[in-house]
Amino acid sequence: MTNDNPFAVNAYLAPQLFCDREEETRTIASALRNGRNVMLYSPRRYGKTGLIHHVFNDLAKLRGARTVFADIYAARDAHEFNTILLNAVHEALNPTPKQFLKNAMAWFGALRPVVTVDELTGKPSIGLERSDRRQDAATTREIFRILQEQDRTIFLAIDEFQQIAQFGDIRMDAVLRTELQRNSKVRVIFSGSQHHILLDLFNNAKNPFYGSADQVELKRIDRAIYADWARTLFKRHKRTLKEEDALFCYDLCRGHTYYVQVLFNRLFADGRPPVRDTIVDILLRIVREQDAIMATLRYALTRNQWDLFAAISKEGEVDTPTGAAFMKKHDLPSSAALVTALQALTDRELVYISEHTAEAGKPVYAPYNPFMAAWFRYR
């Protein structure tokens, strides 16, 4: 079945269906081409992964280049990190199952890999036996040895890189730093969504990665650019989306890329004219879909956490969530109790610091998911 919806929500489709990020694309691609690594940060679902694939789409055209993407979000320790990285490397360098199986033992025989084939898809994958931390470090070095032996430049992206800070068994940042210092063929994008951890990894002089990468922060796409791009895609399919309605979609989602894409995707898929009434109806439908998850969340949070989450969601963005005026308006408890609740909401990634005020540099808090925020306003 062919999907002709141009608004991607789960995968990178094509350069012509990618919105803006021209400056970031040039910056990252230039750094990698010239031998510099990049640390890429943004809040979750701002479009980091799509941007990486967009950059890789260009870099893959370079003669003698190959791109590798490893998402380590699920990695809890060095062993799981190595397993994910090993499979990503092997899939990129051996794109067909025949090549994969042929080279698995030839390349990684020293690691004693266990090759399995999915019964349904026929897709092969590699597993590794668990071992001690010394062997885990040796496994990482072996993977980079294979990369160094390739007769091509390797552009490697490690997504959700902040996970390595939670490994209790090994200082993976030290191992990787050592390998990258002596590996001339691998250039890396370290991307992640937890800014404070990434800043500590790359800006703390006590850590191995200190000063070792260009730093790029991904912010919201300009609303006028996003609206114009969306209108162009509708026009290509002989449909008319007015500027004010495109901007309305953007504003409903506060410019948060993933959710803007979801709303445009739903609007495109809907058979009705893409006008204000249709947009509102679609949004309310999405809000109703949040009922089950919000019911579960209600019982997972304390009363203070739930009330503060509701208050921030109703406001949209708040720079003084523990201030007297905000507390009075939303009938919230003492400031001390709110500080604890705010930290819990931040740790759960229900709210995040979207920006800092221009005057005093105070953090501005916003709900991660604008559809959850809309639930508090419309349910």
Image: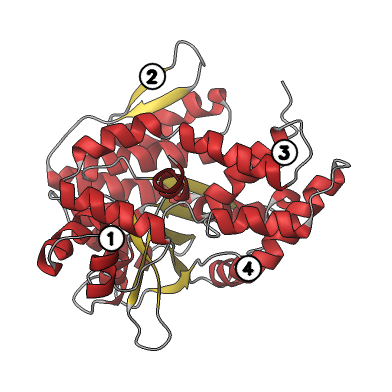
Pointers 3 and 2 in contact (C-beta within 8 Å): no
Decide which of tag 3 and tag 2 comes sooner along the chain.
2
* Residue sticking out furthest to the bottom: 359
Image depth: mark 4 or mark 1 in front: 1
As measured in the structure, the alpha-carbon distance from the residue carrying label 3 to the one carrying label 2 is 40 Å
Please give the label number shown on residue 330.
1
Q: Residue at x 85, y 43 (%)?
A: 239
Q: Is disc 4 surrounded by few (<14), some (14 to 19) or many (20+) residues within 10 Å?
A: few
Image depth: mark 2 or mark 1 in front: 1
As measured in the structure, the alpha-carbon distance from the residue carrying label 2 to the one carrying label 1 is 56 Å
Judging by the rendered image, the residue that carries numbered circle 4 is 222
Pointers 2 and 4 in contact (C-beta within 8 Å): no
Q: Is residue 267 above or below residue 350?
A: above
Image depth: mark 3 or mark 2 in front: 3
Which amino acid, by three-letter code, is at mark 3? Phe
Which amino acid, by three-letter code, is at mark 4? Asp
Dot 2: element: strand
Whole-percent x and y of residue 272? 76, 34
Q: Is disc 2 surrounded by few (<14), some (14 to 19) or many (20+) residues within 10 Å?
A: few
Which amino acid, by three-letter code, is at mark 2? Thr
As measured in the structure, the alpha-carbon distance from the residue carrying label 4 to the one carrying label 1 is 31 Å
Q: Nearer the viewer, residue 319 or 85?
A: 319
Whole-percent x and y of residue 6? 72, 41
Pointers 4 and 1 in contact (C-beta within 8 Å): no
Judging by the rendered image, the residue that carries numbered circle 2 is 116
Q: Quadrant of residue 98?
A: top right
As measured in the structure, the alpha-carbon distance from the residue carrying label 1 to the one carrying label 3 is 37 Å
> Does 186 sit left or right of 250 as displayed?
left
Judging by the rendered image, the residue that carries numbered circle 3 is 268
Decide which of tag 2 and tag 1 comes sooner along the chain.
2
